[in-house]
Amino acid sequence: MADEALFQFLHSELIQYIYKSGANGETENGKNITKLEAMGFRVGQGLIERFTKETPRFKDELDVMKFICKDFWTCLFKKQIDNLRTNHQGIYVLQDNSFRLLSQLSAGKQYLEHAPKYLAFTCGLVRGGLSDLGLKSVVTAEVAGMPACKFQVMIQKA
Amino acid sequence: MADEALFQFLHSELIQYIYKSGANGETENGKNITKLEAMGFRVGQGLIERFTKETPRFKDELDVMKFICKDFWTCLFKKQIDNLRTNHQGIYVLQDNSFRLLSQLSAGKQYLEHAPKYLAFTCGLVRGGLSDLGLKSVVTAEVAGMPACKFQVMIQKA
């Protein structure tokens, strides 16, 4: 329990620090999101490298995505992705019905505008993980009602 | 395994970010160390709060220190402190013979100067944890030979 707490606390300290150290305003918000995403990317790369050392080679793209939804997510958030959908053309939607890094925030609608900063790092984690597994992607996230959230992964064909 | 890796990676991203976003030089280095320590402090407080929810009350100061060396350390670093010494007058020395956050660094002497930035966050974690348990303290760290390291805790009497 205290284990995931460590990640959660460190993650919110990081967000606070990045937002405090930069200026405010719309442009700055965009830059901060980019910074968080980039940090997530590097952490995701590192994690996947260690994590897949002894994993057999993946069959295909879908196999990689299932690994992200199950093993990777469990390692990060102690739960699996609740729902994975795909159009079989490189777009995947990963739904987490109670996303850990949002569960600290109140469920009120007034906090919805703060959600993106709590999602950026994780978007980066996924993108970094996939990149290390040979898949270039664009990852975005949206919150419908907290703490549920959807990550959309668009695989970029080489 | 990937679990601790998450903390380790995030921790080094944090250090890099703080050092990159600030200026360089001696004064700045001091400021960066202070920032890392302060972040550790808040995370330590939060962790102890969750972690001791169901723990029986501690008998005395030594009992608290043992808790830090065993339970708290195991939660953070997947191992216990290897040696705890005290002068029974409020000074405690916690020795970790292979401190996780240093084990990424090479053992060469040329890296010794970088050690403080890898220890500041953890000094804060300990100070924050103790503070939440009612003990005001000053926590410093020193590295003799990597990756072994000693944390010195001086309890401040009220």
Image: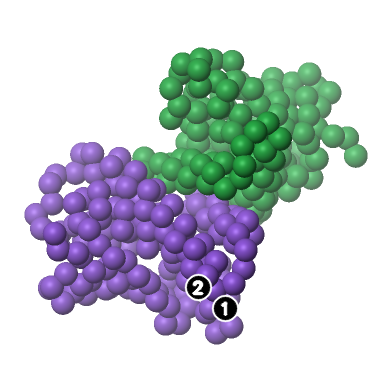
Chain colours: A green, B purple
Measured in 3D between alpha carbons, the distance from the residue under mark 2 to the one under mark 1, in whole angstroms, is 7 Å
**Contact (Cβ within 8 Å) of mark 2 with mark 1:** yes
Residue B127: image location, x then y, percent:
31, 58
Q: Quadrant of the C terminus of chain A?
A: top right
**Amino acid at pointer 1:** Tyr
- Outermost residue to the bottom: B109
Q: Quadrant of the N terminus of chain A?
A: top left
- Outermost residue to the right: A158
Residue A38: image location, x then y, percent:
69, 46
Tell me if mark 2 has few (under 14), some (14-19) or many (20+) residues whose alpha carbon lies within 10 angstroms of its own. some
Residue B113: image location, x then y, percent:
53, 78
Q: Name the residue beneath numbered marker 1.
A: B111
Q: Residue at x 55, y 20 (%)?
A: A112
A130 or A27, which is in the foreground? Answer: A27
**Amino acid at pointer 2:** Ala
Can residue B141 be seen here? The reply is: yes
Disc number for residue B115: 2
Number of marks in picture? 2
Q: Residue at x 50, y 73 (%)?
A: B115
Tell me: B46 left or right of A37: left
Disc number for residue A67: none
Residue B77 vs A32, above or below: the answer is: below
Q: In which chain is the residue bearing label 2?
A: B
Q: Residue at x 68, y 31 (%)?
A: A26
**Circle 1 SS class:** helix
Q: Residue at x 46, y 16 (%)?
A: A108
- Which of the 4 image quadrants contains residue B12? bottom right
**Circle 2 SS class:** helix
Residue A123: image location, x then y, percent:
66, 35
